[in-house]
Amino acid sequence: MHLALSSQPRRKDHGLTLIEVTLVISVLLGLIAFTFIGTTAYKRGADRAICIVQVSTGQKALRSFCNLHEYRPGDSLPDLKGALIGPGRFLEDEPQCPTNGSYSYYNNEVPPLGTTFMRCSLEAHTPTTTYSW
């Protein structure tokens, strides 16, 4: 003899409803979108940091060169960039901006303190302060 616990027949549910599937897909798409937005912002910040480090390195190379050869701000040299950048010099290779900006260099004159020797063409890559360089 078989006893029924309820008066309604048991129903077997297999799978998900259309609303549940749509909800899962929309949540996954939202997470993917946030991931791409976050990585884009991270990449932009990393590129800016790389560019500022390269400008800082160029500035430190200039100051080292000036200290070694006893040049002072305002002193003129025929090829200051050539004296700093090249094989066996303070910077082996000419720096390249990671986001295809271009570097411009100060004239063939030692720049005054607080003025950088190199400058990136992208305004976002300009350092906020150069005091400690």
Image: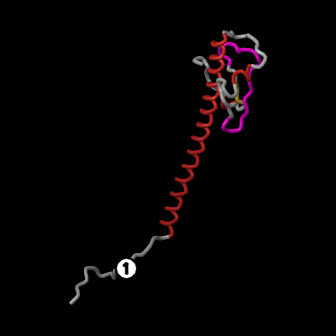
> Residue 3, relative to residue 13: is it above or below?
below
- Image x and y of residue 77, in percent: 76, 14
In this view, the residue in front, 84 or 103, is: 84
Disc 1 element: loop
Magenta residues (range): 97-115
Quarter placement of the C terminus: top right
The residue at the point 30 percent across, 82 percent down is 7
> Does 90 lie within the magenta span?
no
The residue at the point 66 percent across, 9 percent down is 70
Q: Amino acid at mark 1?
A: Arg
Lateral position of residue 27 relative to residue 106, left or right = left
Lateral position of residue 45 relative to residue 14, left or right = right
In this view, the residue in front, 48 or 60, is: 60
Give the residue number, with chain letter if any, for mark 1. Answer: 11
Total marks drawn? 1
Quarter placement of the N terminus: bottom left
In this view, the residue in front, 122 or 11, is: 122
